Amino acid sequence: MLDTYLPILIFILVGMLVGVGPLVLGYVLGPRRPDSEKDSPYECGFEAFETARLKFDVRYYLVAILFIVFDLEIAFLFPWAVVLEELGIFAFWAMVIFLAILVVGFIYEWKKGALEWE
């Protein structure tokens, strides 16, 4: 019984060692020389002028979501294009429908003004 799970246990232990080992090693062996410069807040070379709890405009999130959607579209297009000849005409039309749905969504977002930045 233990023989079947031993490789998994070794894999987990090696993964933990590789992931946590350098962190522990840096904490134990790293230099500790704090001064006022190292302990001060840093933001682009000058003191922070607003709180970190600043609210972002919702358009930032819309643009981020649109980027993720179209990035995933490209992630689906590349493997599909590689094996298109093997998949046949059904896969071609399935991707055409997929892209048409995405284009309709893109046009909707464009018409609603989600891509406009003031």
Image (tube, grey):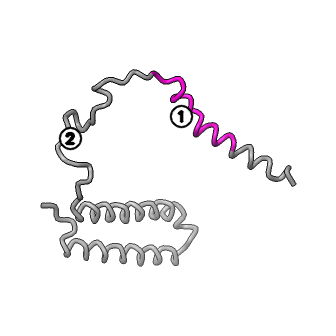
| Residue displayed at 17% across by 43% down | 49
Secondary structure under tag 2 reads loop
- Quadrant in which the N terminus is drawn: bottom right
In the depicted structure, whether residue 4 falls above or below residue 45: below
Q: Left or right: where does residue 10 sit relative to residue 38?
A: right
- Quadrant in which the C terminus is drawn: bottom left
Name the one closer to the observer, 111 or 41.
41
In the depicted structure, whether residue 75 falls above or below residue 28: below
Amino acid type indicated by mark 1: Leu
Q: Position of residue 15 (x, y in %)?
A: 64, 42
Q: Left or right: where does residue 57 sit relative to residue 72?
A: left
Q: Is 1 within the magenta?
A: no
The dot on residue 53 is: none
The dot on residue 23 is: 1
| Residue displayed at 70% across by 45% down | 11
Q: Left or right: where does residue 11 sit relative to residue 27?
A: right
Give residue 61's quadrant in the image: bottom left
Q: Position of residue 85 (x, y in %)?
A: 54, 67
| Residue displayed at 25% across by 76% down | 108
Extreme-left residue of the structure: 118
Q: Left or right: where does residue 28 sit relative to residue 46?
A: right
Q: Which residue bears the numbered disc 2?
A: 48
| Residue displayed at 61% across by 37% down | 18
How many neighbours does mark 2 have within 10 angstroms: few (below 14), some (14-19), or many (20 or more)?
few
Q: First in sequence, mark 1 or 2: give its number.
A: 1
Residue stretch rendered in magenta on the structure: 13-31
Secondary structure under tag 1 reads helix
Amino acid type indicated by mark 2: Ala
Q: Position of residue 83 (x, y in %)?
A: 54, 63
